[in-house]
Amino acid sequence: LVTGAARGVGRQIAQALAAAGATVAVNYLASRTHADTLVAEITAAGGTARAYAADVADHEAVRTMVGSVLDEFGRIDVLVNNAGLGRRGRVQDMTDEDWRLVMETSLDSVFYASRAAMPHLVATRGAIVNVASISGLRGDGGTIAYNAAKGAIVNMTRGMAIDAGPDGVRVNAVCPGLTITPMTQRMRDNETVLGTYLDRIPLARPGGADEIAAAIAFLASPDASYVNGVALAVDGGLTAWTGQPVWRPKRG
């Protein structure tokens, strides 16, 4: 079950899991056409997928969705909490409405889906992978709500890993850096912003959504059977750097 799977990184996550042999429950809210297209693509490639409409910020909608997945497939082995969004604003600028929107969509959704799925993940000794952000590992300017939500997801991941580990359920998080998705298009179109990013990312490029999905597919798989409670930065090395000037030896 992948939340927010119709577009962006979520779409790539669904495709990566399907390619690994998983039956994929594609959650979407408003992007019905995109969800149906994704399901058709997975099916055409020989996989199995179904689309489930649900507002993951609504605990009853999440409970109903999980029930529908169980009714159709009988089990849940992996939950990927991918749904999320951000709003710009410093603490003194942030409106109540924007604060609640970010918290409900990015943080409350992780709680609701994890709570609804956990008994079934215990039964299958499954896994949860939460999509956090490097903004949950470090601070940013002008995105206080996003920082708060993603930071909470990182520590919630650790707490759930401790609680669920004895039941055989692994809980990890992936923390993407700058990634090529529709949500980052405006940043990548701004030459000054993109140039600053590229100066600070040791790999000197944004990540692909498929690269984020590959990390998530790994954490969801048996190959990561002893990985639990990790917040894995997938950021080209951005958070490895202190920000101090880089000394490079002269050549020749």
Image: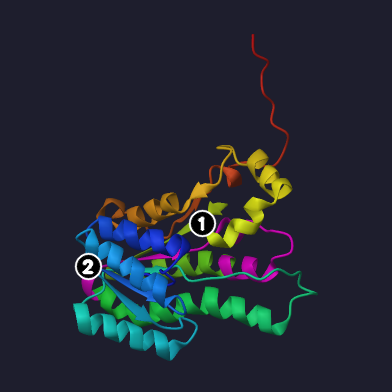
35 to the left or right of 175: left
Residue at 65% x, 58% y: name it.
186
Segment tinted magenta in the rendering: 123-150
Q: Given this view, does label 2 or label 1 mark the residue nearer the observer?
A: 2
Q: Give the labeled residue for mark 1.
A: 175
Residue 83 in percent (x, y) is at 48, 71
Can you say whether 82 is above or below 117 in the image? above
144 to the left or right of 171: right
Describe the colour scheme in one phrase. Answer: rainbow
The C terminus appears in which quarter of the rendering?
A: top right
Out of 218 and 195, give the one closest to the viewer: 195
Q: Give the labeled residue for mark 2.
A: 48
- Under mark 1, the amino acid is Cys
Q: Which mark is residue 140?
A: none
Residue 203 in percent (x, y) is at 55, 37
Residue at 42% x, 64% y: name it.
10
Out of 104 and 38, give the one closest to the viewer: 38
